Image (cartoon, rainbow, N blue to C red):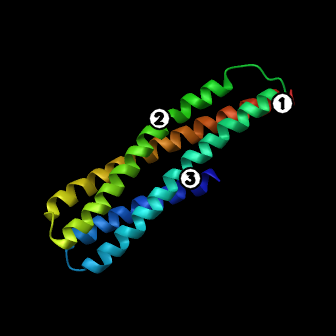
Amino acid sequence: MAQALVTSVLFGLVGLVATAFLGLRGTDVTRHISYGFFSAMVTLLAHSMMMFYLIGKGRAVKDAMAEHSVTGDYYRRIATARKPVFSIGTLAMGVTMVAAIMGASVDTGALPPIVHAMIAYGAIACNLAALKTEVSALMESSRIVDEVNHQIQS
């Protein structure tokens, strides 16, 4: 599941980069809009699912610890590992939404394209930072789950 989530975040990020490239070229506005809309939706879904997955991982660790009387700071560690994902993931989703909404304003002529472009580049940067944070959280949560499983099997 974790690999699918990382792949979907990567897919959304590549789509945003491709959309920015199309916007820079300025020759195919229809494709830029279509790619942008689709990429923004995939990105929002991927980050949301990542957050829910990490919440579920924490809950599973907490339940396993209670069910098997495992002591330790595993739940605190998994909560600490996933905490940055919520802040940077939410920021990435917010900036991505703002960029998409501003794109509609550019299409109607209410906003200069450079404003939309700068926010879109910021969205790409935020999504890249979120990907890095999410991968780190997934790796740490996997290590913690392995430790809990080892405690249960002992």
Q: Is residue 8 left or right of residue 34?
A: right
Residue 38 is situated, as x and y percent measured from the top left of the image, at 42, 69
Determine the residue positioned at 59% across, 57% down.
Answer: 4
What residue would you read off at disc 1?
67
Q: Residues within 10 Å of mark 3 (few under 14, many from 20)?
A: some
Query: Are the residues tagged 3 and 2 within 8 Å (C-beta)?
Result: no
Instruction: Say which amino acid is labelled 2.
Output: Pro
Tell me which corner region of the image, top left, top right, bottom left or bottom right, holds residue 141. Answer: top right
Tell me which corner region of the image, top left, top right, bottom left or bottom right, holds residue 98. Answer: bottom left
User: Element type at marker 2?
Assistant: helix
What residue would you read off at disc 3?
49
Is residue 59 at least partly visible in the picture? yes
Q: Return the disc, 2 or 1, that comes first in the chain's sequence.
A: 1
Residue 102 is situated, as x and y percent measured from the top left of the image, at 25, 61
Determine the residue positioned at 44% across, 45% down.
Answer: 89
Instruction: Say which amino acid is labelled 3.
Output: Met
